[in-house]
Image: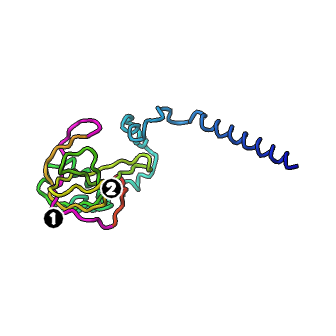
Amino acid sequence: MKRSIIVRIIVAAVLVSAFVVVLIHMPRQGYQGPRDQDLLSLVKSDPNLGNRPAGVGNDSAEALLANAERKPAVPSSGVIALDDETFSPGYDELYNNREKYYGREISVSGYVETDNLPAGQFLIGRDLVWCCDVDKYFIGFLVITDEAIPVAGAELRVLGTIEASSYTDPESGNTFDVPAIRAKRVEPAQKFSRDVFPG
């Protein structure tokens, strides 16, 4: 009796294992590109991806959103304070129109990245999430300081002045002009979301 139960359990385990192997190796429907190509690369490579065909979706809701009064990500005067809602659109605005903001005061909370940066520099930023954790990536600002460099991963608030600088991406070796923050004060951050979304 016990022997037949053990045999049935073994047969069931073999069948389940075979089923799982078949599922893993079944051809996927839909996107058939390279498996290691991430979503962002796919979106960048296909200009039609993301364009909604006419008559699909809710045009009324989109019109309402387009005309809704939104708090500007970057105020026209005073200190630029990027929070959970304004971090991503503020980042875009400051990078796209950086010359307009040189000399302005800024307050940014985020976590620190330090990989392969020269002495006196670190990055402060957040993770931009388009869809899910798989496609998130770091966006942030170069911080220039005369103080000790904080440890990677530290959650800080940086207060300073925006100035022109260059940044060399350690992975690609490409150098870019960026809006950097000349730090006046670096302190522990209050609670913030490490993940931000396109604005």
Q: Position of residue 169 (x, y in %)?
A: 25, 40
Residue in front for this viewpoint, 20 or 70: 20
Q: Quadrant of residue 29?
A: top right
The disc, 2 or 1, on the residue closer to the chain's N-terminal end is: 1
Residue drawn at 19 percent across, 62 percent down: 159
Residue drawn at 17 percent across, 58 percent down: 147
Residue 53 part of the magenta segment:
no
Q: Which residue is mark 1?
A: 78
Sort mark 1 into few (<14), some (14-19) or many (20+) by Cα contacts within 10 Å. few
Q: Position of residue 4 (x, y in %)?
A: 85, 45
**Disc 1 element:** loop
Residue 180 part of the magenta segment:
yes
Q: Which residues are magenta?
A: 170-190
The amino acid at mark 2 is Gly
Main secondary structure found in the magenta portion: strand
* Separation (CA) of disc 2 from disc 1: 29 Å
Q: Is residue 84 left or right of residue 98?
A: right
Q: Quadrant of residue 117?
A: top left
Q: Position of residue 152 (x, y in %)?
A: 30, 53
The amino acid at mark 1 is Gly
Residue 69 appears in the picture as rendered: no
Residue in front for this viewpoint, 124 or 71: 124
Q: Residue furthest bottom?
A: 190
Say if 69 sits above or below 91 in the image.
below
Q: Which residue is mark 2?
A: 153
Residue 193 appears in the picture as rendered: yes
